C-alpha cells in the first residue's frame, strides 16, 4: 500500500426502534442495566460506556458456543467446540424514537428480550417505519442538501396479474422522478440512496422504510442528526 494512503471508511449501519419509555421508565432501566452487567456465569449482560438522564450508551454481550469442523489432509474430520461473543452496540434516550443499534448482529431477539425483562415485560419496542420523502427533507435541513441517486419501489401492481419491483435512477433527483412517474406507488417506496454535497461532501446515506440506515461516516454528530431526522420522519 502506498505511503499516506487511507482506506475508505467502512459504512456504519444503524437500526432504529420506537418504544414507550417515559423519563421514569428510563431512569429505572438505567439503574437495572448497571446491575445486569456481563457475567461469565450467565454468558450475557451489559457493558455501559455512558449513562446519564438523557442518554445511555453501551453494548449487550452474549457468549455463544459453536462447533467447528476441521478437515485433515487424510480426509478425516475433527469437531472442535469454540466459544465466541456477539456484541450489540446501542444508544438509548427517553424519547419515543429512543433506541438505535449500531452495526447490529443478525439476530436481535436476545437483546430485545433482556431489555423487556429488565422492565418486567412492560415495555413494547417496534422497528421504526419511515416516510422516506420526509426523511430526505429532514436530512436536507440538518446535514445539507442531498441528491437522491436511486429509489426502490417494492411490490408495485402494474396490472391485474403483474407485480414488480422498480428501481428509479436519475442524475438530478431520483425521488422527484419516482414521485412524478409513479405517484400511485408513493407509499411503496422501500429504499432511497442519497449523496450529499457542501460541507458533507462525500457522505452517502441509504435509508429503508423499515428503519435501517447505512452511512459512510461514523462521527457522533452525524448519528445525532440522523437520529433526529428519523424521529421527525416516522409514520
Image (spheres, rainbow, N blue to C red):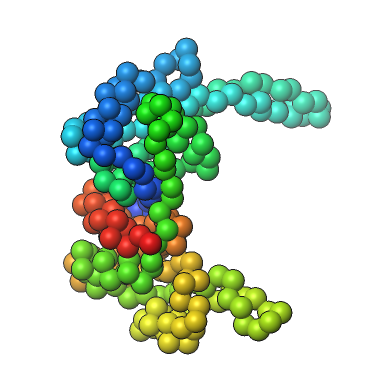
Q: Nearer the viewer, residue 195 or 191?
A: 191
Q: Which residue is drawn at 32% across and 75% down?
A: 147
The answer to whether residue 178 is visible is yes
Q: In which quarter of the image is the C terminus?
A: bottom left
Residue 193: x and y in percent read 41, 68
Q: Which of 36 and 105 is in front in this view?
A: 36
Query: Does 126 sit above or below residue 166?
Result: above
Taking the view exactly as shown, the residue that stands out farthest to the bottom is 181
Q: Which of 235 and 80 is in front in this view?
A: 235
Relative horizontal placement of residue 212, taking residue 98 as reference (left or right): right
In the figure, residue 112 lies in which quadrant?
Answer: top left
Taking the view exactly as shown, the residue that stands out farthest to the front is 122
Query: Does 49 sit above or below residue 21?
Result: above
Query: Does 155 sit above or below residue 92?
Result: below
In the figure, residue 49 lies in which quadrant?
Answer: top left
Q: Which residue is drawn at 52% across and 43% down?
A: 106
Q: Residue at x 23, y 33 (%)?
A: 24
Residue 219: x and y in percent read 25, 50
Relative horizontal placement of residue 43, taking residue 136 as reference (left or right): right
Looking at the rendered structure, the number of numbered marks drawn on it comes to 0
Residue 93: x and y in percent read 26, 41
Residue 224: x and y in percent read 24, 51
Q: Residue at x 44, y 62 (%)?
A: 209
The answer to whether residue 102 is visible is no
Relative horizontal placement of residue 153, taking residue 199 as reference (left or right): right
Amino acid at each position: 500500500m502506498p505511503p499516506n494512503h487511507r482506506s475508505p471508511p467502512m459504512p456504519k449501519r444503524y437500526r432504529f426502534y420506537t418504544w414507550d419509555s417515559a423519563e421514569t421508565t428510563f431512569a429505572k432501566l438505567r439503574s437495572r442495566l448497571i446491575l445486569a452487567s456481563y457475567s461469565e456465569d450467565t454468558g450475557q449482560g451489559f457493558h455501559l460506556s455512558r449513562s446519564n438522564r438523557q442518554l445511555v450508551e453501551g453494548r449487550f454481550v452474549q457468549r455463544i458456543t459453536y462447533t467447528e469442523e476441521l478437515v485433515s489432509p487424510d480426509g478425516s474430520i475433527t469437531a472442535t467446540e469454540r466459544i465466541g461473543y456477539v456484541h450489540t452496540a446501542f444508544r438509548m434516550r427517553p424519547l419515543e424514537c429512543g433506541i438505535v443499534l449500531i452495526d447490529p448482529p443478525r439476530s436481535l431477539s436476545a437483546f430485545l428480550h433482556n431489555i423487556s425483562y429488565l422492565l418486567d415485560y412492560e415495555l413494547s419496542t417496534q422497528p421504526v417505519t419511515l416516510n422516506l420523502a420526509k426523511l430526505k427533507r429532514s436530512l436536507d435541513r440538518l446535514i445539507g442538501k442531498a441528491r437522491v441517486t436511486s429509489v426502490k419501489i417494492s411490490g408495485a401492481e402494474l396490472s391485474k396479474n403483474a407485480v414488480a419491483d422498480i428501481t428509479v435512477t436519475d442524475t438530478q433527483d431520483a425521488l422527484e422522478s419516482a414521485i412524478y412517474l409513479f405517484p400511485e406507488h408513493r407509499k411503496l417506496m422501500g429504499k432511497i440512496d442519497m449523496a450529499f454535497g457542501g460541507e458533507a461532501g462525500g457522505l452517502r446515506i441509504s435509508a429503508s422504510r423499515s428503519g435501517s440506515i447505512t452511512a459512510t461516516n461514523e462521527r457522533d454528530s452525524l448519528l445525532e442528526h440522523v437520529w433526529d431526522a428519523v424521529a421527525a420522519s416516522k409514520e
